[in-house]
Amino acid sequence: MSYFHGAHGVTIEGDVTAIHAKTYIHHIASSSSNNSIEKLREHTVAGAMHDSAERCDAPKCHPETRVAVQDEIVSWIVHEDDEDEPKGILWITGPAGTGKTAIMGSIADTCYKRGLLACGFFFSSFAGSNNRRPKRCLVATLAYQLVQHDALRDVGEHILSYFERNPSIFDRQLEVQLDQLLLQPLRESRKAPASRTWPKVVVVDGLDECEAEQYGDAPRSSQAAARAKEADQTEILHALLKAANDPSFPFRIIIASRPEHAIQSFFTNIAQHITRKIFLDEKYDPDADMALFLECKFADIRHRYQLSASWPSEDIKQTLVQNASGQFIYVATVMRFVEGPSYPPHELLDQVLELRDTDASNNPFAPLDALYTHIISSNPNPHLATRWLPLIFCTRCLSSPTADPPSARFVQLFLETFPGEASYVFGGLNSLVSIPPTDDRTSPYSLFHMSLTDFLLDSTRQGPNDIP
């Protein structure tokens, strides 16, 4: 039957997206929502999503490791409502290198597969696109994921409607953005019975890596202080706390960060009533998980190089676990180094075991510092490596504050004094730096872990004569 059957007073408007008649209205799928989605996408940072291509090499928990802490987190997501005083926020914290991002990545994947993940944002100050550093794209990226979620179509329609009415929303303060693009649409949609099938959790990783946005021109006087990153981190926390306290917000929020002073103070003094805290310490038996990780990695090396089944000894593996002092980044870096192409794996492992000043009893970073120092010192030109690494990863003098990290090809053109010098400099650093293939003209160099920047910026951790 024709759509015009029995109709009169017909008018056709615009792009033929809607046909109106006095006795009949039929809406044909409009392109306006698609346009709104595309405009919203322009304000997002795809690399901050848990399953982005940019995060393909991001750390994840090795199979059968960190099981206890992951089970505790998933149980909190699913069953927290059964508690007498349920908490809306879970803060996962611990020192550098304890595996926070790996745990968050694994939790996000698990929740996605189980239909529990609503949206997420993975900050990073040292890897990926520049927009993963400031708060600018946080709300837009979360909202975009809600729009794309199959179980939240009604919410998505309301988000796009609010965005169409106020396309300049991202020039407003973070709490205003969150209220209009997340809370208001959720208030409109919570009346629908389908809300029982909605996902349950929002994840925000690496909050301590969020860097400050500077507004307007540079400070007019030398005495004027730049905006501190702690201000933006606290603004994010206040916005998320407002959401968690809103009865219309149906999701739990997981936040992972180092226990930096401003963040610690917020959770201790402001959000204590609504926050549950997980501190990654001995309670979760990281030593057992690291021992399992090492055994799996060494088994792969033994198979690849046809080494004895007794290599390495249990004592050696236990020594590596003790040296790690709870820091997964230590054992992960050791294994990347041992798997390197420069020498046979047993010789590289011997180099690690012979490092001096690796007693972690007084300084838990001593073994990691000694390992970083050894890897850099083993480079064909360690002096040049210690100049290049801070230039690329710490000072960012090769890119503007608002630009993405420069491509490896650009770095080569800028820093090389002769063709192939970059390959010479980075040849022995493949356990610290992810190096794009030679035919890749767009990808940047990236660090495997932020702790290397801490090491490079603190001369006391390098020692006065450790790196030639």
Image (tube, helix red, strand yellow):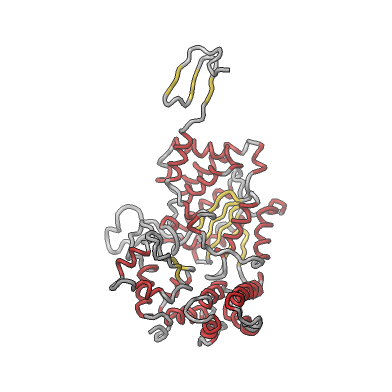
Percent of width and height locating residue 71: 68, 61
> Where is residue 148, by image quadrant?
top right
Q: Residue at x 54, y 80 (%)?
A: 345
Percent of width and height locating residue 437: 42, 65
Percent of width and height locating residue 300: 60, 73
Percent of width and height locating residue 380: 39, 81
Total marks placed? 0
Note whether 157 is above or below 94 in the view shown. above
Closer to the camera, 413 or 188?
413
> Where is residue 274, by image quadrant?
bottom right
Quadrant into which the C terminus falls: bottom left
Q: Residue at x 64, y 67 (%)?
A: 66
Q: Residue at x 61, y 62 (%)?
A: 277
Q: Residue at x 69, y 57 (%)?
A: 75
In the displayed structure image, the side of residue 236 where residue 402 appears, left or right: left
Note whether 111 is above or below 434 in the view shown. above
Closer to the camera, 393 or 162?
393
Note whether 84 is above or below 358 in the view shown. above
In the displayed structure image, the side of residue 337 where residue 300 appears, left or right: right
